[in-house]
Image (cartoon, grey):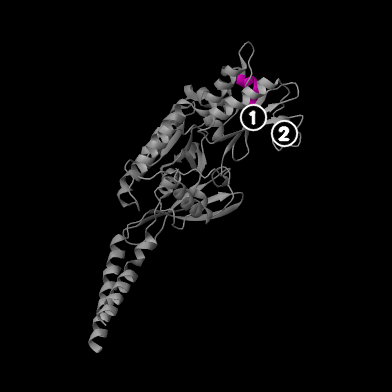
Amino acid sequence: MQKISKLMVAACICWAVHPFAAFACRYNVREVGFVDLRIEQYHLYGFVDQNTPAEVTSTFEQISYASLLDSNIQFEIVDVNQQNEHPAIKYVHSEQIHTFPSAVLVSPDGQSLPVDVTKPAEPFEQTVRSALDDILASPKRQEILQQVIKAYGVVLLIEAADAQQNKKAKEAAGAAIEQVASQMQYLPKPIAHPPVLVEVSQESLPREKILLWSLGLDSAHEITTQRAMMDPALLSHGLKDKLDQPHAAVLYGRARWIGPMFKGEQITQDNLTAVLFVIGEDCECDLDQRWLQGTMLPARWDENLQAQAAENLGFDPENPIVKTEISWIVGRGNSSYPGVPLGYQEIVVEPQTNDQAGPGEQRIAYSVERTGKTERYMLNAVRFVGSIVAGLTVLSVGIGLFIVFRARRNL
């Protein structure tokens, strides 16, 4: 009988502490963002034709595969004569490619960018290596990668020509970062460092062509891509014309883009804060699971960055067991890749306070207007319910022990 009583006590305790399992999540959104499930890869298509020498094709293939090995970009050679029904052939036509070898970079959401892999009086191997280096790295992308490894996230601010607009946007970004930093103690899981601001000045725009293109801000196509590639001054002029107002995006995890691209008057403290708070959320909250795997920037993720991320996170995001767990979590939502974060085009984010937030909680709700349809996401900005759960646990254990005690006395 004493053994049965002990078992009953143990059962009561397990039942009492069970609420913790409902509130605890092994990962938050930031941590999930470091896991690459390879569901949103970029593609670099190398196009050759029947007149391309075999050694050129071989060099093209070998250098590209080796260079892109540690990146989120997949390379494929396509022979336009022998593979004229290949899905990538459409880019040969849309980009009006007439000389080979040539290359086109395609993002997960389908936008394309021709890449110049041949230059007059320059060895093909040298041109290809240089083109791949430009695709994989730039000063601001390297800065973003270093920051997201240790910080909560990054607010990327792309400046326009107007100094007053830039100042206003920078103040809004700074205020959003301060607000999130002041609430980080209430996060479901601790994050050591608050968000940081990374600025892209007008002068640095030509060097950040791939970054801007991946964020949907490329204007080289509007000029005539091949000419822009060969004329940096023309490319710079085009980008400056396109960015007539500042733009801002939020990045996290493995340099993933989350939420909409804010521009001009949309860059406010409330809008940025609403998106930033998502990064600190539990991965198993009521959040739409499509938020967990935002679009990654095209970049090289080498062993050094991987080691830094693992040390900072306390687990290896490349571990197969971790990937399996994250795959299951992400799979609970929309299994198909949504493209640009949630398919946003022109987006209005309307921060609102939620009067139904419980004690110790601050909730932010916002509406996302997309293609005429409004989706409402209730985002737990901060959850501080430990004291409530602890109180219920103590009460449950007390009731359980009382029941066991009464049962033993009646025997």
Horizontal relation, residue 176 to residue 90: left or right: left
Task: Assess whether mark 2 and mark 1 are in contact (beta carbons under 8 angstroms).
Answer: no
Q: Is 280 included in the stretch rendered in magenta?
A: no
| Residue 112 placement: quadrant | top right
Seen at 77% across and 29% down, the residue is: 81
Seen at 41% across and 58% down, the residue is: 354
Q: What's under tag 1, amino acid-wise?
A: Val
Q: In this view, does 402 lie above or below 329?
A: below
Q: Is 223 included in the stretch rendered in magenta?
A: yes
User: As rendered, which of 310 and 237 lies closer to the eye?
Assistant: 310
Q: Mark 2 points at which residue?
A: 89
Seen at 27% across and 78% down, the residue is: 3
Q: Position of residue 313 (x, y in %)?
A: 36, 43
| Residue 285 placement: quadrant | bottom left
Q: Mark 1 points at which residue?
A: 104
Locate the C terminus and report the quarter of the image it occupies.
bottom left
* Callout count: 2
Residue 168 visible in rendering: no
Q: How far apart are marks 1 and 2 (CA)?
A: 10 Å
Q: Position of residue 383 (x, y in %)?
A: 35, 56
Report the span colored magenta: 221-229
Q: Residues within 10 Å of mark 1 (few under 14, many from 20)?
A: many
Horizontal relation, residue 292 to residue 87: left or right: left
Residue 291 visible in rendering: yes
Element under disc 2: helix
Locate the N terminus and report the quarter of the image it occupies.
bottom left
| Residue 103 placement: quadrant | top right
Q: Position of residue 374 (x, y in %)?
A: 56, 54
Q: Where is residue 378 in the image (x, y as percent from the top left)?
A: 46, 56
